Every structure is written in C-alpha cells, then in structure tokens.
Amino acid sequence: MTKKTYRIIEYQKLKLLGSGKKIKSWLLVTLTGFLVTIETIMNKRARNVIFLIFLGLFLISAPIVVLYTAGFRINSQRMTLVKTGLFSLSSEPKGANIFIDNTDTKQKTNTVIKNIMPGEHVISFVKTGYLPWEKKLEVKENETSFVQKAELFLDSESTVKIDTEYSVYALDTNGEKIAFALSTEGWLEIWFKLLSSGEEKLLLRLPKTDFETISLSWSLFDKETLIIKETKNSQIVWRSVKQNGESETLSDNPFLTWKRDENQFLFIKETVGQTNLVNRNQNEQETILAIIPSGQYEFLPAPPSFVLLHDQNRNKILLIDDRGVDQPILLNTSALSVAWNPQNKKQLLYASDFELHIFDAENLTDELLTRLSVSISGAAWHTSGQDIFFTDNKNLFAVELDNRGGQRQIWTLAAFEKIETFATTENGKTIYLFGTKDDNTGLFERKLVE
C-alpha cells in the first residue's frame, strides 16, 4: 500500500468519526427533548394523580377527624360507630390515681375523663396511705357518669387514746367528749374529758352511800348535759349535770318526755286499755297524736313532724308522723341502734340483730343495706351521708350507700377483741371506740383521714 493510499484511508476515517459526533449530538438533543416532553407529560399526570389521592384522603379523613373530635369511636365488636361518654370523678381527699379497667389513666381526682366507650367499666381510686376504692359503672352514649366525692379511708391502725378501763362511762354520739366515774375513798367522782384537747374537768362528787349502782348518759336533746341515774333499794334518782358543774335533781326520767319548744310538750300517757302519745300545749290542752302499743318508751331525737320512740323492754322503735295523718305509725320494728342522716334528716338508719336498714320517712321506703351472720351492735352515719359505720362487737366496718354495679363496697376499718361502743366526730375525720385490743382496754382512736 502506497503512502498516498494510506493517507486517503486515514482521512476517510476521520471524516466518518466527525460525522459520528454530529449524529450523536443530534440524537442526544432529540432524545433529551423527547424525555423533557415525556417528563412534562408525566409531571402533569403525576400531579393530577397526587392531587386526586390527597383529595380522596381529605374527603375520607376530614369526616373521621370531625367525628373523632366530636367523640365518636368505632365499636370493634359490633363494627358500628358509637358516641362516647364521660366520667366525672372526684374523691375526698382528692389526688387519688384513677384506673379504668385496671389501666392507669395517668390522671388524678378530681377530673373529667372524656371519650369513654359505652358499656360497663371498673373504676378504681388508689391513693398512697388509703384503702382502695372500686366500683363498676356504666357509661352511656353522649352521657356523663358521676362519682361524687367518694370517701377514701386512711389505712391505719387504731391507737390508744385513754388506757384506763372505766367501769362507768358515757361517750357522746358526736365523738367530742367522754364522761366517766372515778372511785375514791368514800366518794365517786364524775369527770368529763374533751377528746380533741385532752382537757379534763371534775363535774360532781357523790357519796358512795347514796346509791348502789350508777349509770351515765349524755342528754339526747342537749349535748352539753350529762344525765346520771342512781339506783338504791329499787329507787331511782335522776340528776342532770352541766359542763360548768351545775347539778339538778330531776323529778322523773328525762327521756320519758320531750319538750320540743314552748308550745309542745310530748309524753306517753296510759289510760284504761290504751297507751297514747300525747302533746300538751302551753294552755295545758292535751291532744292525742297516736295510739301506740303498750311498752316502756323513751324519746329519741327526731326531725320536725316526726316522733321517734324506743321501747326499752323489747328493743323496738316506733316512728310516728305527728301531722294528724290517718296512719301516724310509719315504722314499728326491732332496732338496737338508730341515727338520722346528717345530710337528709328524713332518712333513719337502724340496725336490728343481723341487718342494717335505711328508712325514708318522706317516701316511706325501707331499704336493706346489708345482712350479716353475726349480730350488729351499733351503727352511725359518716358526716357526708354517703357512707355508714357499724360494728359487730369485734370489728368496725364502713359501707357505702352507692349500690351502682350491683354491690356496695365494705371496708374493715378496725379489729378488736371487743368493741363496746363507738362514735364518729362531726368533721368525719376520726372514730373513737371504747373496747379491748391487744389486751389493752380503754378508748381508742381510729383516724379516717390525714
């Protein structure tokens, strides 16, 4: 091959290579334009698709958000949309942790908990140092279920307040004071003591020769007056003693009459074959309020329009409406202990041998609270009117009145070898018990709240 021929061939190669670069450039430009065109078309379609997707999500989610905010939820069992309810929960004292169906809500009383699925739920209050509170409650759609000031009781032991075993004493029903007798040489001293401060005062000194037996009780109609019953040779002498030391010998048993006011003096009057409850006015005119069964009656406190009598021989009570109705005797039943609701003076708590009842004098209903296998020895209201305390000679219990969920919660507050009597303070913070515990006999204090 000659040099000339070689050069021609090389020139043709270069020419072709040059043409190839132009072709590649043209193809690149053409391809890029096509891709831009495709990308533009795809971007429009993608935007439309994305817009439609977001529009669909909005149309679906917006009602869901609105319904969720309004309190609607899906019932997973029935696969239906339901309106939720609320719990309004409070306790005394407040600050208890709230559990719903054993799940900690991370909230404390007092509060409102929203978006509760309709149905039954177990509500629990747990507070450090207190006995737990629990109740099954039903929530209905778009309604609020309430727990109003559930009483929480301190988880504590009873402690000795007075370690003296008094043979004769009287604990007042308000848990404020105790009267007691101390024997000295030739004399019996009557003292009283304020339980809150411990202040003591000598009220009276009686010669031991004046009586064989003696008993003390606080007046049911004047809480500042102590009643002393002295017995000798089957003869009874009654005395009243004020807290300032004033003493008066009474003509008769002060519990056999009731001076309501200046215009009403009630008493029991026996006639031939009939026993009457009689009212005597200031003009000495007598009116028979009711004909009652024969018995050894004493008057007990009662709200206006009602008279409460206790038959000492049969341990029965009579509740009488004195407004001139055709059937004045509203209640005639066995009872060992009675007390009026401090928040509703028409509700009478009474304890028979094994049962605890509430009689509503306005609505004439008699509700059985609980029945025990052992005898009930005493009963009293909590100051809130929502709970009741009772004893069975050895144990002190509290029972709530709220029976929603089909049952009432009962707490054991104290266990003794023997409980003789007890009283609750008016502020509801303390119960005083006279009895025997751990071989100690005296007055014990059981705190209910800090």
Image (tube, rainbow, N blue to C red):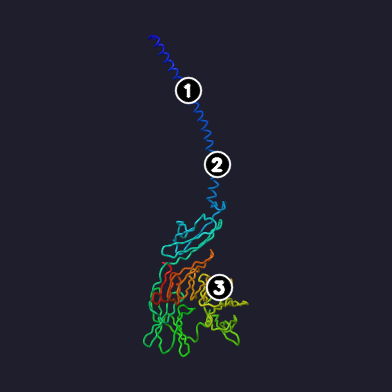
Using a 10 Å C-alpha cutoff, classify the residue at mark 2 as few (fewer than 14 neighbours), some (14 to 19) or many (20 or more).
few
| Cα–Cα span, label 2 and label 3 | 64 Å
Taking depth in this image into account, of 387 and 210 the one nearest to the observer is 387
For mark 2, give the secondary structure: helix
Q: Quadrant of residue 15?
A: top left
Say whether disc 2 or disc 3 marks the residue closer to the N-terminus.
Answer: 2
Q: From mark 2 to mark 1, how far is it between C-alphas?
A: 42 Å
Amino acid type of the residue tagged 2 in the rendering: Gly
Kind of residue sitting beneath label 3: Phe
Location of residue 201 by image quarter: bottom left
Residue found at the far front of this picture:
1
Say whether disc 2 or disc 1 marks the residue closer to the N-terminus: 1
The residue located at (47%, 71%) in the rendering is 397
Q: Nearer the viewer, mark 1 or mark 3?
A: 1
Identify the residue position indicated by label 3 in the image: 359
> Of 137 and 258, which appears nearest the observer?
137
Residue at which label 1 appears: 27
Give residue 393's position: percent from left, percent from top. 46, 76
Task: From the image, tell me which residue sits under label 2.
Answer: 56
Identify the disc placed on residue 443: none
Residue type at the position of mark 1: Leu
Which quarter shows the N terminus?
A: top left
Q: Name the quadrant containing residue 333.
A: bottom right
Q: Residues within 10 Å of mark 1 (few under 14, many from 20)?
A: few
Whether 386 is drawn above or below 326: the answer is: above
Residue 263 appears left or right of 156: right
How many other residues sit within 10 Å of disc 3, few (<14), some (14-19) or many (≥20)?
many
How far across and down, in percent of the image, does residue 230 sit? Answer: 45, 86
Helix, strand or loop status at disc 1: helix
- Number of numbered discs: 3
